[in-house]
Image (cartoon, rainbow, N blue to C red):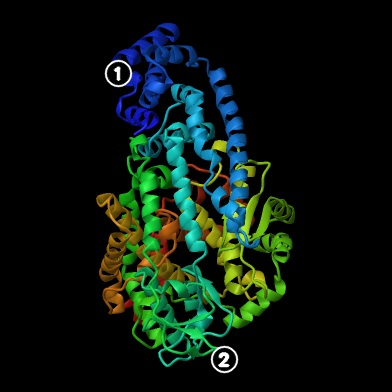
Amino acid sequence: MDIFKIALVLAMLIPALASAGEPRQAAVRQLIERHGDSKAARIETGVRQVAERWRPADGDEDAFVNFCVENFIADESELERTFLRLQSLMEQVDGHLHEVRREILSPLELDSGPVMAVDSLFSAVDLAAHVDEDLFRSKVAFLALLNFPVHTLADRLEKGAGWDRESWARSRMMDRFAQRVPAEISQDISRAFTEADRYIADYYIRMDRLLAEDGERLFPEGPRLITHWGLRDELKSQYANGDGLRRQRAILQVMERIVRQEIPAEVIDNGELLWEPESNRSWRISAEGTAAGEPLSLEREPDIRYARLLDIFHAVRAADRYTPATPTFIKRKFESDRQIPEAEVEALLASILLSDEFKQTAALISRNLGRPLEPFDIWYNGFKASGGQPEAELDRMVSSRYPDVAAFSNDLPRILTDLGFAPERAAWLAEHIVVDPSRGAGHATGALRREDQAHLRTRVGKEGMDYKGYNIAIHELGHNVEQVFSLNAIDYWWLQGVPNNAFTEALAFLFQNRDLELLGLEPPSEEARRMEALDTLWSTAEIAGVSLVDMQVWRWMYEHPDATPAGLREATLAIARDVWNRYFAPLFGSRDQEILAIYSHMIVYGLYLPDYAIGHIVAFQVADKIGHGDFGKEFERMARQGRITPDAWMRGAVGKPISARALLAAARAALPPVAGGS
């Protein structure tokens, strides 16, 4: 081990000099003597916060005491100016670095041709990874810690109701300085997430190369679908087809081969091979489009899916020792990011899955289908209005309207006006959103500087945008509009955004649910609106099950930090089976299903999935409120609340806390008497 590594290890193990009682007491004593007892509480908090993060490299005991004595700000007007200056500077720092990172990743994320070697290498460069440590080394972070309190989730839940907007902004500012993670660890985290994202972004299944057991091609020439999004949406679309059941069963088999890592590696995004997922056999494709010769002997895909997840786990776990208040990634996601305790989230998800309304809806779906439920029916979409149009007709309507990305971009003002935004507000929003051609399924990337623009990434094929891509694009537009309002129209930059990802998903669902209206189809009837409650309940239950798998997989990784990819694979499948057997098997009649492990989010985004379930619940509450008012004005009012706690945001938006009661009550009212069971 070289000298640098030895020094790094010692720095991690040796307590910070200032954490000893004597220098802390000396600093507190001198500051109280200088500024009086009225400042004692603030002095003690500030000195403690600095001491907890001070390292030997920051200076000896005298340096610590001198820093505290010379940099404590007693004057309230000077404290105000310092807060505002920090806000102004950090908007520029974070904003510009965000723009650099977006540009670096553009060749990987946008459909702009082959990815060059230099771009693959550059994707590991994250200049922002060094900023936080630079802020500590320069003592900027210590200045903030000395003069502004760091709040826990418990603090905010207890005191936040009495805070004004500036108090909330000051509290959120200190989230930035609460953790001190070394730059090399932050960069490793960024690299791990980027590699996982690239793995998923390139994971396509050639549907036109799938064979049934009898050798028949199951899909027409052309469909190339990304996992899991494209596969799931194709499965949903088959409910409208008379012979869709056999295709749905085939897609289920594809998903099962993927999560088990049994899929032959060579058939992934390969148009030269035919693949029968039932038997897992493959053939070369002949000039006539049939299987040529004998089945090939192909190796299964290595456990890359689970290796990528383990890479993320090891990267984020390395930061645990630097976040004593939230010493695991799980705690950071729930208490720092989501701002809802993990136990409360789990209870909220379970309240949906164990509800009588979920059971009754399952029975109704089985009657509608005229058969027992099969595992893929977790994606049943028969309650969703389709405007009376089959998928092919919707594809035609969308592709004729949006032959390329520019056409969709040019239509943004019209879309936003039709949604309910005033024409001048719609134009203002459109000016702040750039539409890019996505390599993957599509996503929204907000700005961090008010001088920048939000980016909507959407996939448009050679034949134009299809309905699936359009549906996703409208969802992502909802993200972008929220991002613009909560940055460009907010009072304090530190409050930009929403409480957590569930809320941005909730607001995006409000857009996505109106996609058919925006194509000029009839708005939903009263009956369709009733069915929307059942659709939302079913979708929420599906993603709640997936979320529980995600949560339990992360718990398992922390319990088995030395796991291999193969070990994680088997654990994930076992967890998926267990969640299925507990919540779904009694309704579906089949046990030990592993389909809940298919979501790509679990591999790429690190405990993001619970936000979708919470988002459905929040969206239903918010939609009910907006439905009785002006959509544009209400959407803007809610989005401009910014990043306060979820509980405070919901009370401000709809006057009630987050709860599944409203959704369950609406679903109960929508169920026919025979499904109600009385």
Considering only vertical position in the picture, is 350 above or below 587? above
Q: Is residue 391 left or right of residue 61?
A: right
Q: Is residue 137 left or right of residue 447?
A: left
Indicate the position of residue 269 as horizontal and vertical percent values: 51, 72
Q: Is residue 439 visible?
A: yes
- Which is more toward the observer, 99 or 623? 99
Report the residue marked by disc 1: 20
Among the 4 quarters of the image, the one containing residue 92 = top right
**Is the residue marked by circle 2 packed among few (<14), some (14-19), or many (20+) residues within 10 Å?**
few
Q: Residue at x 40, y 42 (%)?
A: 336
Secondary structure at badge 2 equals loop
Q: Residues within 10 Å of mark 1 (few under 14, many from 20)?
A: few
Q: Residue at x 74, y 56 (%)?
A: 423
Name the quarter where the N terminus is drawn.
Answer: top left
Labels 1 & 2 near each other (Cβ < 8 A): no
- The disc label shown at residue 395, or none: none
The percent position of residue 583, horizontal first and vertical second, equals 29, 68
Residue 402, x across and y down, in percent: 70, 70
Circle 2 is placed at which residue position?
288
Residue 678 visible in image: no
Identify the amino acid type marked 1: Ala
